[in-house]
Image: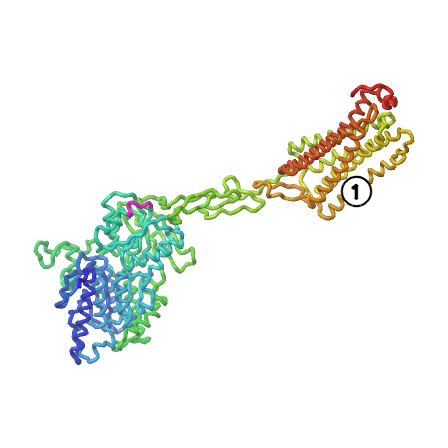
Amino acid sequence: MQITSSLMPFVSVLWMTVFSLAGCKANPVSCRLWAEPQMPILSLDGDFIIGGIFSIHYYVKSEQATYTMMPAQPQCAGSMEFRELHVARALEFTIHEINNRTDLLPGIKLGYQIYDSCSAVPMSIKVAFQFGNGLDPIFKDTDACSKSGAAAVPAIVGDSSSTPSIAMARMLGLFGIPQVSHSSTCACLSDKSQFPAFFRTIPSDQHQAAALAKMVKYFGWTWIGAVRSDTDYGNLGMASFLKAAQEEGICVEYSEAYYRTQPRSKLKRVANVIRRSTARVIVAFLASGDMKFLVEELLQQPMSPLQWIGSEAWIIHPDFLQFNICAGALGFGVPRSVIPGFREFLLDLSPAKVLKSPILKEFWESSFSCSLKGRTGVRECDGSEDIHMLQNPYTDTSQLRTTNMVYKATYAIAHAIHGVTCTDTQCDKRNKITPWQILNQLKRVNFTTKNGYQVNFDSNGDPVAVYELINLQFKKDGALDFVPVGYYDASRSRGQEIGISSVISWVGGDTKVPVSVCSESCPPGTRKTVQKGRPVCCYDCIPCAEGEISNKTDSLDCVRCPPEFWPNTKQDSCLPKPVEFLSWNDSLSIILTVFSITGTFMSVCVTAVFYKHRTSPIVRANNSELSFLLLFSLTLCFLCSLTFIGRPSEWSCMLRHTAFGITFVLCISCVLGKTIVVLMAFRATLPGSNVMKWFGPPQQRLSVLAFTLTQAIICVIWLKVSHPFPFKNLKHYKDKIILECNLGSSIGFWAVLGYIGLLAVLCFVLAFLARKLPDNFNEAKFITFSMLIFCAVWITFIPAYVSSPGKFTVAVEIFAILASSFGLIICIFAPKCFIIIFRPMKNTKKYLMGKVPSKAL
């Protein structure tokens, strides 16, 4: 069976575990670990030992396993991470500070055992076993193998990375040994069903992912790239971010993963994806080591500037201050702090002290590039090395972000031990405490550190999520620096979590917020439509449909205007539709009014002429009483057309139609009466005819009254059943309102018109029959012409009325009234007036009786 190199560390741990158990079974009296224990890099004896584990190196030496002998002891490899040594010594400093206090654990001395996990899971697991068993390879108690009593350490601080912490927490949780991490941020560690003994002083990635998504949304970036470490930290953190980003409407062009131990070809591929992308903002959920490899690869070829959004693992790492490509980067980091006395503690090193610790010796030799023991080929340290002049992450105490997390974690464990071993005034170091007691006490700790930070844990073992918004800005000397420009506080109300307190320097030192969108924003008046096969952030902008608007940028849908409103030309707001009716100041209304007044004036003038010559034969010939009544009705017909002009109201709608119907029937009934008079007059001239007595003046008046009264009754019934009323017609035109008179009952309207038409047809037929009667002035001819015009006008009126839009419907009706009225007055009265005024010699009884030869008019 072949084992891949990536599984070798796990196989080694398995071998060590098997050999350890075999040792226990071989001897019923004592147990012996067959594997050599891993020695701490820094340690101090005490009444209670606090464990610590940090990722000071990045790799573990791997050797080919033969499976015939015990695997070699795993050893760390690669260069030292000075920042991690700095953080590890913060645990050492904190314990010394606690031991010097009289109010916390008085009479009790804390010790520590600090290990290097080499950022490797196998090393973390082995150290976790040792935290449970101790360093002594021989156990003489008969039940020592079960380790049912107290663990070697009551609690542990670390690890620095999520993946090793997950491995440790799974095992330590079985024994209730509490683990308080200072920088393991994976949201999965909040699951108490899997990790019941895990706590941390740094917020979960769940909060960081939400904060990053809200920040990206805050600056209007909807099209981003994403890269992550191919670890639990990167994969789970990015998964949380992508979920939060989707809820905020952010689209991801690509999402790539990389881990520093993967082949370089994978790194090149990720870099090429970034170079080819159109997104100008990239969210990097990377461990500092992975990010460093990626930045160095991107620097190999020129590329467009990118706006980096960083996770806390690298955004506050000093190594990235040397890369100008990171200028303008934004990200959330734990708040800065000050720890009094810590810098002096770090710098309290001398060659003599350094030689007592292999890890400090390695640090010294790496920092000053010399050898304390005179190795061949390396300059020997000569004592001139001054650590106070050294400038590297180990000596940098300007930020103390992660350092403060270790400080808080160590104090939390100390307070938990105090709660178990101490009463109000004294502590008993002889108490045998168990990890379960410390675990239960940690859940209740609530205190403030000496440098002013509140420490407590929620039900998931997490602290309150508070971040500083970090911006990498150029200083005056051209060097990059970490500048806090805002904050994120998860305890604030929704929408108020992010605050910007300072000016942000963007990519390349620009002061203008960079733009990173797949498609430009859709202006008001348009809506977004998703491009087929692409993310929702990639869309086209199409104008709103007719009658719809969008009044904000990037509208998903257009909204239809209310019925009485219509969009403006930009389709970004609804305006009231203009109301259309035949108003008095309309040019068409003015023309019709002029004709109406002209017709009225003509009627008055004709009446005056007839009245002045009322005794003349031509006026008396055809019943002057009916002529004057006809002139009166025509005057009313001309005037009633004016009721159709102006804004329709309840009264005007009822008046215009009823007045029109009654006056026209009065007019036609007079004409009908005159026609009958002509016919009766001819009959009366025949020998033995007695017909005129049946249609004398009383009968004429009665017929006119009867015809008119019938129309009046029809109008009253119409008004009673369903009268006309003002109506806003919204259907004929889309962009304007027609204010018109609704007929109410269409039957009533057509009954009125039908009755008028019936009388007009009857009048026309009778006049047509009397047209050739032997008279010099046969009035029947002129009545025939007038009725012909009247019928023609009203027959053409019907289709014109139905098809005319808006105010032209009313204009057609007025035109029909005026045209038919003018036809009547001209055809019936114009010839008479001509004779009266211009041919008075013909205005004689002899001429009218036909005794004088006549000429055509």
Q: Quadrant of the C terminus?
A: top right
Residue at the extreme right of the image, as rendered: 688
How packed mark 1 is, by other alpha carbons closer than 10 Å (few <14, some 14-19, many 20 or more), is some
Q: Is-magenta flag for residue 276?
A: yes
Do we see residue 570 in this rendering? yes
Give residue 387's position: percent from left, percent from top: 18, 56
| Residue 797: quarter of image | top right
Question: Is residue 695 found left or right of 113 in the rendered image?
Answer: right
Magenta range: 273-278
**Three-letter code for the amino acid on which mark 1 is drawn:** Thr
Give residue 195's position: percent from left, percent from top: 31, 67
Q: Quickly name the residue at label 1.
A: 710
Q: Secondary structure at mark 1?
A: helix
For the stretch drawn in magenta, what is the main secondary structure?
Answer: helix
| Residue 448: quarter of image | bottom left
Question: Is residue 451 found left or right of 708 in the rendered image?
Answer: left
